[in-house]
Image (cartoon, rainbow, N blue to C red):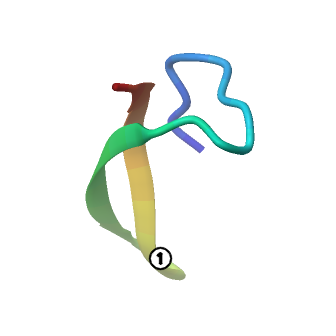
Amino acid sequence: SGLIDEIAENDKVSFELERGMRGMNAVKVKKI
């Protein structure tokens, strides 16, 4: 996965979707 920050369960995050071999992947995930 494309994690930039360490993310806890209740954090709000932003991410971009990228089409991968097995469907959509979240990339550039970061806290907001």
Q: Residue reaching furthest bottom?
A: 23
Please state which of residues 22 and 28 is positioned toward the viewer in this rendering.
28
Q: Is 25 left, or right, of 19 in this rendering?
A: right
Where in the figure is residue 8, as x and y percent of width and height?
73, 32
**Residue 29 vertical placement versus 17 (above, below):** above
Furthest-top residue in this view: 5
Q: Mark 1 Cα within 10 Å, few/some/many (few <14, many 20+)?
A: few
Identity of the residue drawn at 60% across and 44% down: 1
Q: Nearer the viewer, residue 18 or 5?
A: 5
Q: Is residue 19 above or below residue 28?
A: below
Q: Nearer the viewer, residue 10 or 21?
A: 10
Please give the name of the residue rendered at 43% of the width and 55% of the height, measured from the top-left corner.
Answer: 26
Task: Give 24 or 14, whichever is nearer the viewer.
Answer: 14
Look at mark 1 in the image and give the residue it sits on. 21
For the view shown, which residue lies furthest in the right direction? 9
Q: Give the percent coordinates (x, y) of residue 23.
A: 45, 82
Image point 42% across, 27% down: which residue? 30
Identified at 34% across, 25% down, the residue is 32
The amino acid on which the numbered mark 1 sits, given as a three-letter code, is Met
Q: Position of residue 21 (x, y in %)?
A: 47, 76
Secondary element at tag 1? loop
How many numbered marks have been drawn onto this rendered protein structure?
A: 1
Q: Can you say whether 29 is above or below 21 in the image?
A: above
Residue 31 place in picture, x, y as percent: 44, 25
The quadrant where residue 24 appears? bottom left
In the rendered view, tell whether residue 3 sits above or below residue 21.
Answer: above
